[in-house]
Image: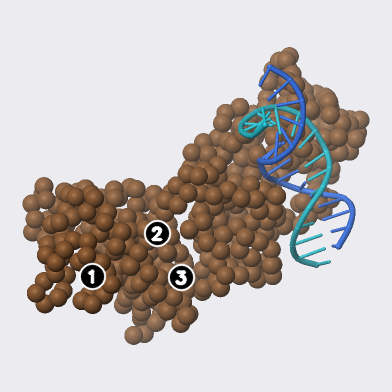
Chain colours: A brown, B cyan, C blue
Amino acid sequence: MPELPEVETVRRGLTRLVEGATIDHVDVLYEKMVDPEPESFKEQLKGKTIEAIDRRGKYLLFRFNDDLTMVSHLRMEGKYDVQPDDAPITKHTHVIFHLTDGRALRYTDTRKFGRMNLLKTGTESQLIAGLKKMGPEPTAEALTVDYMTKIFAKSKKAIKPFLLDQNNIAGLGNIYVDETLWMSRINPLQHANTIPAFRIRQLRDNIIKEISHAISGHGTTVHSFSTAYGEAGQFQNQLNVYGRKGEPCVRCGTPIEKTKVAQRGTHFCPACQALQEIPSETMVLGLTGGIASGKSMVSAFFKTHGVPIIDADQVAREVVVPGSTGLTQIQQTFGWQIIQPDGTLDRKALGSLVFGQPEALAKLNAIMLPLIQAAVTAQMATYRKQNVPLVVYDAPTLFESKGASLVDEIMVVSLPEDIQLARLMARDQTTEADAMKRIKSQLPLDEKIKRADIVIDNSGTVEKTKAQVVKWLDEAGFSTLLNTAKQA
DNA sequence: AAGCCGCCCTGTAGGC
DNA sequence: TGCCTACAGGGCGGCT
């Protein structure tokens, strides 16, 4: 089912194959496919040369000499291919453009949904209903934050059919809508006018990014799409939710669900993309990274800009202070030996009990993780109530401790392993073997990067790292925070 | 006016 | 094995 990236892939392929070619004559085998009626359609195209092939949204625009344009929509299954003129025709071939060079450009379409309209060049944007009202192309230049904000405020529609509507944004279809909503953590049923400003911005960035990546990957092959060369696209290997019903969410591990929204099969993660009854304008940024990666420095940098920090390590200590239910549960599970004479938790003793003991560690996690999650969620709720624009959740084990679905965006501080090793050895005065063991005990960096929205490269100077954070703050719409810090 | 639904088509997967 | 139904989904026309 071609969406914009597939149509663009077809356009590029066809341009290489038939630009400059001249039509000898045309056969129309399925009359309803063309407009005007076949006799006039064939007559007008006789002897015309293909000067260029353009695209607008999911429409192809064949430009001929003498101000003639053919608007072609592939709909669900339409395909073009170029064959020697005498090659046998297949069952679902409906239109054949015989070229003067002995080849033929053929249009095949099993379900006959595609349409071709022939008209005077320049009139197509008025005469073709779909082109007349079509929204901007999903590029950084055409799809502005201002425009998005304006159209979202005006519509009560569920976001899924809203994005499928070509009058709002050109080129998105069922697959890329599911994908970009997952990337942006928006429930497909969320009403457009209830989506907070920071999420609109995320969604815009993700749409632009996803469409351009898909074009680079020559489109997605699901069911039947193939390029003009008859090759399959590559992008289906990069889909995160579409067609992945029941498989774990790449980000948080919750099984992907499939439902029906606006008559369309709809895939989403029920944890990451929860429906927001009372949408919050507060954005929570999850900050993580490997040991000695420089995450703490980035966290401190946010703090100097007045961004509140929720510190996962600190919360983990708070939920086991003397008298807490957390400490009681741990004592009941592991015995009095983990309680010090002053009533506090003996971390060293507990550590040695669970180190290298998967079962004991699982028991400890079963006690700790829900307590930490509850405490963190409560802190987030407080900030939301105060309408704080940005909060950072600083969590070294964000993914391992199931924190990924609690946050709105994930930033990973990244460092090549050799530099990380050197920094860790210098910081903690440990041996190489010991430092390596600790690095290897964590989720691998490339796995974290795969699940991240933003990666901060900390292999350079501190200033270079900070500059990347400043750039993100600016692009994410928090430039006022930067100004505040400068004045302070 | 905005939003919802059925229709256009055919092949295929899954249930019984 | 075969028959039946549901499903795939882009865009448009018609209805509320």
Discs 2, 1: same chain: yes
Count residues near mark 2 (Cα–Cα under 10 Å), then give few for <14, some for 14-19, many for 20+.
many
Q: Name the residue under label 3.
A: A283
Rendering coords of residue A340 (x, y %): 11, 71
SS for dot 2: helix
Identified at 61% across, 40% down, the residue is A6
The amino acid type, in three-letter code, at marker 3 is Met
Residue A38 lies in what quarter of the image? top right
Q: Could you tell me which chain the residue with mark 3 belongs to?
A: A
Identified at 25% across, 66% down, the residue is A329
The quadrant the C terminus of chain A occupies is: bottom left
The amino acid type, in three-letter code, at marker 1 is Leu
Count residues near mark 3 (Cα–Cα under 10 Å), then give few for <14, some for 14-19, many for 20+.
many
Rendering coords of residue A244 (x, y %): 52, 43
Instruction: Return the disc, 1 or 3, that comes first in the chain's sequence.
Output: 3
Does A20 sit left or right of A293 as displayed? right
Q: How far apart are marks 1 and 3 (CA)?
A: 32 Å
Count residues near mark 1 (Cα–Cα under 10 Å), then give few for <14, some for 14-19, many for 20+.
many
Q: Mark 2 points at which residue?
A: A404
SS for dot 3: strand
Q: Name the residue under label 1.
A: A327
Instruction: Return the disc, 2 or 1, that comes first in the chain's sequence.
Output: 1
- Front label number (2 vs 1): 1
Is label 2 in contact with label 3 (beta carbons under 8 Å)?
A: no
- Front label number (2 vs 3): 2
Q: Which is more toward the observer, A76 or A245?
A: A245
- Front label number (1 vs 3): 1
Residue A275 lies in what quarter of the image? bottom right
Rendering coords of residue A61 (x, y %): 73, 42
Does A114 sit left or right of A296 as displayed? right
Rendering coords of residue A168 (x, y %): 68, 59
Residue A453 lies in what quarter of the image? bottom left
